[in-house]
Each structure stands twice: as C-alpha cells, then as structure tokens.
Image (cartoon, grey):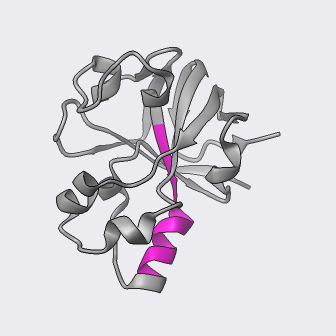
Amino acid sequence: MARLEAIFVAPDKGAPMEARDEVDAIAGTGLSGDRYAEGTGTFSKPSPDRHVTLIEVEALEAVERDYGIAIPPEGTRRNLLTRGVYLNHLVDRIFHVGQVRLRGVEFCEPCDVLEKGLGKPGARGALLHRGGLRAEILEGGTLRIGDELRAP
C-alpha cells in the first residue's frame, strides 16, 4: 500500500522544515502553516505548482545506496514523504492522499539552493529525475501520517 510517511512545513522562506503529524490541505492554496500557502516562500506566486511537494522515501534510500549521500527527508524541503508509489507517474494525473484530492503538475527537480542548503556536494545530481512532484490541491482536508495514497 502506498502511504504518507511524513509531513513537513516551513513558515517562512529559509526556515527549517517542521515535522507535523497532520496538516490541513487547503484547496487552491497549499498546506496550512507552510510558506507557500502564506505567500512567503522563495518562489511564492499564485500558481498550482506551489501548493504541495512530494518525494519518495525510496528515492532518498537510492541516493544513499548509489551515491553514499544521506539526505534527511526534511533536507529535501519537500512537504510530503511517501512510500510505495512512483511519483513521476503522477504528472498530469489526479490522485488522493487520505481524503485530499491532488493533481500532479510537474517534476520537482532539485536545484543548486537545495544542494547548498544540505551542504552535500553531489546531492543535486543524485536526486535528478527523482526529486519529487509538485501538486495542486483540488479538494482539501486533513492529511495525516499513515494516510493511504491512491492513484487510478
């Protein structure tokens, strides 16, 4: 079963990611308490590709196995950590995490800012094409660790 493993938000750009057991997903906006929902993110602008970001546990495990680079989930600056689903397959598809309905918008490729923030040379290249997914929140609700991720 594909599921939600962890939830992270950051109240302001550059602020450390804070782990949550649950968070409200607000349709058309983002995650309650997160920098992009509040309009204080580095790339804040009204855009569906900034509502929520996801990354796979398996991608982080592969980076450590293949490149010897250990990246903590919060270090990716992604909001949702998933297990058991290949996120790249969800671009342009509607899916659910618990009661929340999302649409995959585009790949969330790593950038130089991510590598610099991690302080781990090679992290950007190691995460290339497995840096996660940007998604739009179509129908909101509460996201909780352990929620099932369902894709048609």
Instruction: Provide residue 90's location: percent of width, then percent of height.
Output: 68, 43
Residue 126, above or below 25: below
Instruction: Provide residue 42's location: percent of width, then percent of height.
Output: 23, 33
* Span shown in magenta: 53-65
Q: Quadrant of the N terminus?
A: bottom right
**Which secondary structure dominates the residues rendered in magenta?**
helix
Residue 88 is inside the magenta segment: no
Write down the quadrant of residue 105 in the picture: top right
Instruction: Provide residue 85's location: percent of width, then percent of height.
Output: 67, 55
Q: Residue at x 56, y 40 (%)?
A: 106
Left or right position of 99 against 17: right
Most distant residue in the right direction = 152
Residue 73, above or below 17: below
Q: Residue at x 49, y 74 (%)?
A: 61
Q: Residue at x 47, y 56 (%)?
A: 131
Judging depth in this view, the residue of 44 and 11 nearest the camera is 44
Write down the quadrant of residue 79 in the picture: top left
Left or right position of 58 against 37: right
Q: Quadrant of the C terminus?
A: top right
Q: How many marks?
A: 0
Write down the quadrant of residue 102 in the picture: top right
Q: Residue at x 68, y 34 (%)?
A: 96
Instruction: Provide residue 20's location: percent of width, then percent of height.
Output: 37, 40
